[in-house]
Image (cartoon, grey):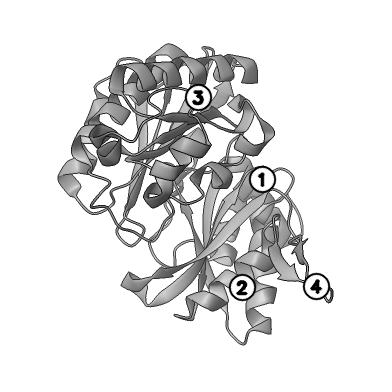
Amino acid sequence: MINTDKKIIECVSNFSDGRNADVIYKIASSVQSTKNVKLLNVEPDKDYNRTVITFAGDPLCVKEAAFKAIAAAAELIDMSRQRGEHPRIGATDVCPIIPVANVTKDECVKLSNELGKDVGEKLGIPVYLYEDSARSAERKNLENIRKGEYEGLEQKLKDWIPDYGPTKYTDKVRRSGATVIGSRFFLIAYNVNLNTREVNVANEIAKKVRESGSMIIDKAGKKKRVPGILKYVKAIGVELNEYNITQVSLNLTNYKETSMHEVFESIKAQAKAHGIEATGSEIIGLVPKEALLEAGAFYTGNNVKNNLIEVAIEHLGLSQLNKFKPEKKIIENLL
């Protein structure tokens, strides 16, 4: 067990391989071999071709584990051959540093810069800083940095100079891609299942609910952005071929302001308008207990009952695709 009286940070690194078990094992093992770090969760997705690896512990040791994992991914994943449903820019697509206990945001920003510098200089990987670590407003949001994805990286290196690492599209960069690193608030990766295979419908719903909304052409023929209905929500529509469904794939960047159950109920309403149903959902990686307790309280109408977690699992349909195990998915149960 990690002593919660000590400084603890969490890292939720996303790697661009969800299909090769040997690759995933080797990346996870590089984390697990680091002292004072606890490997909390390894979650591959074959359709997304992406694995989320979550670990936590002493800040300097987590930085070391993250560096080792990024190095392993660069060696094992060839981005010039990688394909998948999820947007990505490199073998290690994104590596967030998250304060958990007795650590400030500023400390995490400093740590992310140290990690970015090491990755850029020692591994030769272009690094972009995002969220609290971003050096400009346009680089704060991950989707702005990731725009054009890996396939557009050669041009991006010309237009957006990386914060660390090489600025030229070398053979090494062609293989590794770039990496996005930064300090941020606890993010919940949350997907809502739709009983349709029409990904365009899933995308329409995503545009309706996400904070950034969508672009339209107004009566004067000018482009205009129409905001979505939920703040602190990022979303896209994706196919899930394994289950013959689509999903609205979401990032909840501040679950205290926009809750999981609010997102789920909003998507249910949007799905109904399209003549389909939101049949369940899933959490990728880990979730704070508070988020599930709030959902349970919402669905029971109070926060007194002892089975709020079970109520949340049932009403959000968290076990529709894979059984939701609180002992493995709630971060407080693992620390």
x then y, percent, for residue 182: 53, 28
Marks 2, 1: nearer the viewer:
2
Distance between the Cα atoms at labels 1 and 4?
Answer: 33 Å
From the image, tell me which residue sits under label 2.
204
For marks 2 and 1 on the same chain, the one whose residue lies earlier in the sequence: 2
Instruction: Give the image quarter of residue 285.
Output: top left
Vertical placement of residue 162 versus 314, above or below? above
From the image, tell me which residue sits under label 1.
255
Vertical placement of residue 140 versus 210, above or below? above
For marks 3 and 2 on the same chain, the one whose residue lies earlier in the sequence: 3
The N terminus lies in which quarter of the figure? top left
Marks 3, 2: nearer the viewer:
3
Vertical placement of residue 311 versus 168, above or below? below
Distance between the Cα atoms at labels 4 and 3?
Answer: 37 Å
- Residue at the right extreme? 220
Q: What residue type is labelled 1?
A: Tyr
Distance between the Cα atoms at labels 2 and 1?
Answer: 23 Å
The C terminus lies in which quarter of the figure? top left
Report the disc number at residue 163: 3
Crowd band around label 1 with a 10 angstrom C-alpha radius: few (<14), some (14–19), many (20+): many
Q: Tell me if label 3 and label 2 are in contact, CB under 8 Å.
A: no
From the image, tell me which residue sits under label 4.
218
Residue at image location 57% in from the left, 40% down from the top: 288
Q: What residue type is labelled 2?
A: Glu
| Position of residue 142 in the picture relative to residue 31 (left or right) | right
